[in-house]
């Protein structure tokens, strides 16, 4: 993975050109062309990264991390190795970028779905609380279970972190951010419906996610979609959630 050789260009100074196999080539932007060249370079670089991330997501889900060569990712994205190494130092950096991008997409979806949940809840009515908890579970399912490849991707990255110790700190940090964001949503939600958690919110999130992931994995293995009307999610999980809440 040595340094990529400089490719001569006949383009005017300040112009950014991306060619298959060459990545992004940037001319000097201080010879009369100002900053537009830099802007064009940035946009092209962002587009290259986006296409590589999308391609990597699909290929990893199909083949797994260990059986996903850089060449295949580049071929799927429409590039060759030069474009890859102008954006990422090693393959694992791209995998972590995929994890970050996909996590952020689902985080935003969940926040939007949760905005109107629990507006008319009576904290002294267990049935009302259970219905609100069912709604939050459904909101999570509909925003995180859109396809089995997402679960496969998460599982692959976690397995790779187990095999590759130097990857663990970055995976742990990404998971920490995702969990803390979910904890914030749960804290706001229980405050809005007027109830109190019986255990730390971090334990609530860990317990609910463990059960959710177990149900998701089982359904994926059996080739069944995990939909929002799954009885485990609409009945069992909300009741378990209620067990972690103090009701007067």
Image (spheres, rainbow, N blue to C red):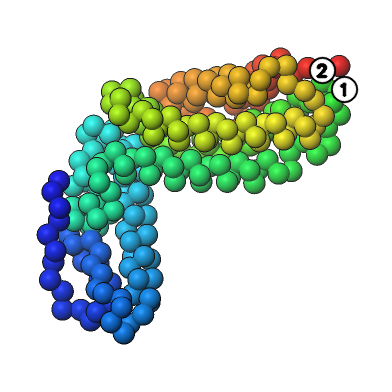
112 and 177: which one is in front? 177
* Label ID, residue 124: 1
Q: Is residue 81 above or below residue 132?
A: below
Residue at the extreme front? 30
Q: Secondary structure at mark 1?
A: loop
Q: Residue at x 26, y 41 (%)?
A: 91
Picture quadrant where residue 165 is located = top left
* Cβ–Cβ under 8 Å for marks 1 and 2: yes
Q: CA distance from mark 1 to mark 2?
A: 7 Å
Q: Residue at x 20, y 79 (%)?
A: 11
Q: Is residue 214 above or below residue 142?
A: above
Q: Is residue 177 above or below residue 51?
A: above
Residue designated by label 2: 247
230 and 118: which one is in front? 118
Q: Residue at x 32, y 58 (%)?
A: 48
Q: Residue at x 82, y 17 (%)?
A: 247
Quadrant including the C terminus: top right
Q: Position of residue 113 (x, y in %)?
A: 65, 43
Is residue 63 among what the camera can see?
A: yes
């Amino acid at each position: 993975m040595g340094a990529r050789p400089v490719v001569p260009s006949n383009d005017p100074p300040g112009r950014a050109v991306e060619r298959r196999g060459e990545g992004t080539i940037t001319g000097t932007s201080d010879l009369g062309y100002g900053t537009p060249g830099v802007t064009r370079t940035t946009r092209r670089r962002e587009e290259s990264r986006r296409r590589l991330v999308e391609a990597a997501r699909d290929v990893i889900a199909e083949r797994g991390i260990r059986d996903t060569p850089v060449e295949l990712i580049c071929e799927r994205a429409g590039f060759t190795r030069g474009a890859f190494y102008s954006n990422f130092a090693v393959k694992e950096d791209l995998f972590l970028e995929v994890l970050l991008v996909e996590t952020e997409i689902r985080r935003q979806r969940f926040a939007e779905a949760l905005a109107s949940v629990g507006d008319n809840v009576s904290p002294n009515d267990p049935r009302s609380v259970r219905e609100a908890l069912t709604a939050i579970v459904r909101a999570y399912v509909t925003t995180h279970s859109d396809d089995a490849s997402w679960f496969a991707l998460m599982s692959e990255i976690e397995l790779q972190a187990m095999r590759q110790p130097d990857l663990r700190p970055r995976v742990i940090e990404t998971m920490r951010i995702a969990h803390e964001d979910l904890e914030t949503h749960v804290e706001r939600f229980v405050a809005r419906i007027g109830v109190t958690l019986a255990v730390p919110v971090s334990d609530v999130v860990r317990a609910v996610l463990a059960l959710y992931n177990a149900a998701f994995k089982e359904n994926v293995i059996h080739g069944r979609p995990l939909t929002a009307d799954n009885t485990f999610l609409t009945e069992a999980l909300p009741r378990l959630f209620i067990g972690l809440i103090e009701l007067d």
